[in-house]
Image: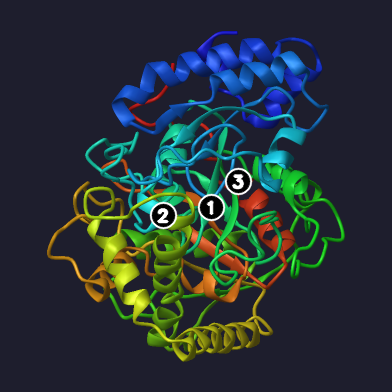
Amino acid sequence: MRISDYIELDALGLAELVRRREVTPSELMDVASAAIEQVNPALNAVIASLRDDAERSLRAGLPDGPFTGVPYLVKDLGLLVAGTPTGMGSRLFQDVVSPADDELMTRFRRAGLVALGKTNTPELGLNVVTEPVAHGPTRNPWRPDRTPGGSSGGAAAAVAARMVPMAHGNDVAGSIRIPSSCCGLFGLKPSRGRIPTGPVEGEVLLGMATDHALTRSVRDSAALLDAIAGPDTGAPYSAPPPPRPFLEEARTPPGRLRIALIEAAWSGVPVHDECKRAARRAAALCEELGHEVVPARLEIDWERVRFAFRMLLSYQAHLLDRVCPALGLAPGRDTLEVATLAMAEAGRRMSAVDLHEVIVARDLITRQVGQFFTRFDAVLTPTLATPPIPPGTLDADDPALDVETWLDRCFAFAAFTPLFNVTGNPAMSVPLHMTADGLPVGVQFAGRYADEATLLRLAGQLEQAAPWAGRRPAVCAA
């Protein structure tokens, strides 16, 4: 198979070729490896090879799944792959090897996916761009002088540049949707409790974090969600099971939806004209498709949202003060970035009462947003407050950095995504807009809790009405 043929197909398209025996998984692995070798040096998206693991999987025989033989990349954060380090974008954790796959990796394998490598991520996922000291910055394939976003920035750059048709990502404040917007991809953050977190975690970051993928097509995202969703043994809670497969939903017309259009950031930060234009154009397209779009206000206390994210601080303190000693690691300035150390120090000053207040804030916001969704089927916003920014704009290793300034800088870029991590609602970035100078700008749609179905129906309709699959970035496998 030639690279020029490989890059034309999404993951389900490649799986269909394998099913018809028109190409073998080994051939797909080779062509994907060639694509990675061709364009990764310009982007620094893939930072570790899993080729040995992939070859063992092929020799053992792949399961019969929806993506049998399809090349895949996993983010070097959160996902455990047996026998390989999970460095989490940090110099400190580069030699910490997982003894086993976690439940999500087990499900990726069961779906037939063949993981070829690990993608770059900011240190511990604590940035909305991908520029860790450990591996250096990842570049945006549309314009290498811009960020691909974060924290799933390596995944986004790899998929946009056609190294693989889709890649694993996770999302605690927008880390699937932010890079999807920056790189012109479809990125769905599932509902809280939809994706398994075991066996190590019961819920990740008070349920504000979840995993899924960045894809070029809506149907790939839906089919993968079918393959990996559902509780694992001992899960503390789970999202209600869907009445129909998500892939079927993505192929189903959504009917007439009532959509709230929100252009202003809840924090009050300025929103770039291109991002407003993207939302307005998406609103106009939705109206053309028969939906009711209503300019609306969702009255949210942004300081309460921001306060809910102080769970990041307590988590960093726990990681450095409890987990690291158990692993024989000594955290310090020579192995960790300034933002990480500052967050951990602030976390040490939090009391049990503070952490309880974080939970209270999370639940109050969730109730407010739940009430809003009694009047609307979906909310439409810009995904980000600005188009992709230059590398170096958000430097997590700046010696002068303090925690509050750092959080404000990150949330000024990612102004619209964090709310739906606090509430657990499903949300997606859809690649409907390009700036005049050739940069992707996504729009975000959020839905009712556990109602990925409505979002996927709408996304499938938008993809048909305004196809994006034919767009190719400047740096692209060919």
Nearest the eye: 377 or 324: 324
Of tags 3 and 2, the one toward the viewer is 2
Give me the C-alpha separation between circle 3 and circle 2. 30 Å
Task: Find residue 54 and report its horizontal and vertical position in percent.
Answer: 62, 21
Q: Is residue 190 visible?
A: yes
Q: Position of residue 137 (x, y in %)?
A: 28, 40
- Taking the spot 54% from the left edge, 82% from the top edge, the residue there is 362
At mark 1, the secondary structure is: strand
Q: Quadrant of residue 67?
A: top right
The residues bearing labels 2 and 1 have C-alpha atoms spaced at a distance of 9 Å
Q: Amino acid at mark 2?
A: Gly
Q: Residues within 10 Å of mark 1 (few under 14, many from 20)?
A: many
| Residue 471 visible in the shown view | no
Q: Which sits earlier in the primary sequence, circle 1 or circle 3?
A: 1
Q: Name the residue that disc number 1 marks.
A: 170
Residue that numbered label 2 is attached to: 125
Question: Within 10 Å of the Cα at label 2, are there few (<14), some (14-19), or many (20+) other Cα atoms?
Answer: many
Q: CA distance from mark 1 to mark 3?
A: 23 Å
Q: Which residue occupies the extreme left position in the image?
A: 400
Of circles 1 and 3, the one toward us is 1
Give the vertical position of 258 relative to 242 (above or below).
Answer: below
Three-letter residue code for mark 1: Asn
- The disc, 2 or 1, on the residue closer to the chain's N-terminal end is 2
Q: Give the residue displayed 76% in from the left and 44% down from the top.
A: 227
Res. 463 mark:
3
Question: Residue 269: percent from the left, percent from the top?
Answer: 28, 75
Q: Nearer the viewer, residue 424 or 87?
A: 87
In depth, the one of 72 and 360 nearer the eye is 360
Residue at figure coordinates x 12%, y 65% from the top left: 400
Give x and y (percent) for residue 300.
46, 87
